Image (spheres, grey):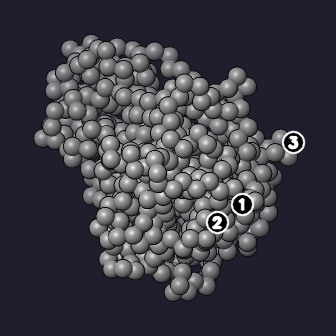
Amino acid sequence: MKILVCISNVPDTTSKINFTADNKEFDKNGVQFVINPWDEYALTRAIELKEAKGGTVTVLNVGEADAEPNIRKALAIGADDAIRVNAKPVDAFFVAQQIAAIAKENNYDMILMGKESIDYNGSQVHGMVGEILGIPSVVPAFKLDMVDDSTARLEREIEGGKEVVEVKLPFVASAQQPMSEPRIPNMRGIMTARTKPLAVKEPVGAEAKAEYVNFSKPEKKGGVKMIDPENAGELITLLRNEAKVL
Amino acid sequence: MSVLVFVEGLNGEIKKSSLEAASYGSQVAQQLGTTATAVAIGEVHEEALARLGEQGISKVLYDADDRLKQFVADAYVKVIAKAAQQESAKVLVFSNSNIGAAVGAKLAVRLQGSLATNVTSLPKTDGGSFTVTRGVFSGKAFADVALTSDVKIIAVKKNSVEITHNAGSAATIEKLSADLTDADFAAAPKDTVMQDTEGGVLLPEAEIVVSGGRGLKGPENWHLVEDLAKALGAATACSKPVSDMDWRPHHEHVGQTGITVSPNLYIAIGISGAIQHLAGVNSSKVIVVINKDPEAPFFKAADYGIVGDAFEVVPKLIEAAKALDK
């Protein structure tokens, strides 16, 4: 089984978010980057399936050279090889077309990625890739198993419940917890990752359809009003008469 | 040209998040000097469809194909694309739900449109541009995004738009048929399991959320969260450690890698307020924090706070909430 896992390189979840002085771009200064946590669920599940059924796991990142440490980390966790499409990921449509182009060349049995990236929170790329390739996209999935060699069974979250879906290979799925328990690379993984292949490819011509023109941060809260715990019921009165939310 | 709103049904009624999308869509239509049409799929009562007039929808296209009662992305996309073509729609509006996001991405490819999800503002349309604001960096920032294609697709963030109630005329209902074939249902779900949501409050749509953390010491104490939620008509939620320890199901986990909520009122009990948790809740209008540690970082993000033992404070809140006249 050939599995493609798409990962993005995102600011660590504890990062303070700042922008450049003109508010046009994210300020990377002093920010630690990690594999998008949602993508890690996809990556570990892919590795688990490979361990159980055989096959290969290829990691794909559409991004610039500064993403390579995290691509190597994905290899250290257990992926076999990696591809980086050397381009700034300007919008979801552009990225989806790059992923689809790689997928067309290589005939993967499944294409997995996280439910969304924690930076742009678009939740768009998986659906777009499925549509471009003309294969099903199951989003967002929290369980993925093989029924037989050509059919997968997924459970997907819908508002207020879940759906069980069976699809023929190939397909696209996006992952969320508890699909798998993300792993920390061990020393052996880190050593072998250095020599695993990481191919750098130039992007295919594709247009972006959304342009980020300005960033801003939410307004700061006015401060907290403390209530005496002995008189906790007072809170309910304030929520009704002052905050007017009850 | 018109604005087309996709509305989702649940138990015959239209979801709250779709009423928000409809209100948003008709305001966009006003801005552009056109009308707003809705397309409805699945099991929705005709009266509920007609009531969309209150949100400024003039016409509803309804595909009553029985097979659409379940969500099947390919089929839904075909129906919406047909409606968009019929109405020459240049702006499509959805709720940023799991279903809305899934069909939005596919439609963006099919209609070669610009897609913005998680949108929190009406578009700015001066000078021929079309720019919306959307939430990014998991609630830590906003971005203004110019949608540059002819067709624009917008998924509106839940609880970020007021539902309008105009005493207008009812929406007219027209049947729509997209000539669906069996192939469109190839990826249909085998099974759909709905959670037992007591009182019918869905967490992503809830106006009030009561959430518990490790400070509650164990799942056996969750009645405190549940009883307060019940008294307030709220949905229940939890922090990541709580769902990781299986005290509560994963679908209740609110935070950066869980669900993002933006209710009017978020009450956090025994949650310290790690930055990852704040990312999931910081667009809530009012935040209440109850924690016995006065140094808990969550107090910095709160509007109201109580430093105290949850086991003593929460019963007092339940009592006071029950005494409120509804």
Q: Are marks 3 and 1 on the same chain?
A: no
Q: Nearer the viewer, residue A137 or B127?
A: A137
Q: Nearer the viewer, mark 2 or mark 3?
A: 2
- For label 2, the residue is A101
Would you say the residues marked 2 and 3 are in contact, meaning their CB atoms lie under 8 Å apart?
no
Q: Secondary structure at mark 2?
A: helix
Residue A30 spot, x, y in % from top left:
54, 24
Horizontal side of B172 relative to A187 (left or right) equals right
Would you say the residues marked 1 and 2 are in contact, meaning their CB atoms lie under 8 Å apart?
yes
Q: Residue at x 47, y 54 (%)?
A: A196
| Separation of residues labelled 1 and 2 (CA atoms) | 7 Å
Q: Which mark is residue A204?
A: 1
Vertical side of A22 occupied by B103: above or below: below
Horizontal side of A219 relative to A75 (left or right) equals right
| Separation of residues labelled 3 and 1 (CA atoms) | 32 Å
Q: Nearer the viewer, residue A110 or B59?
A: A110
Residue B1 spot, x, y in % from top left:
79, 63
The reply to whether residue B156 is in sight is no
Residue type of the residue flagged with mark 2? Ala
Vertical side of A111 occupied by B254: above or below: above
Residue B307 spot, x, y in % from top left:
27, 16
- For label 3, the residue is B127
| Separation of residues labelled 2 and 3 (CA atoms) | 36 Å
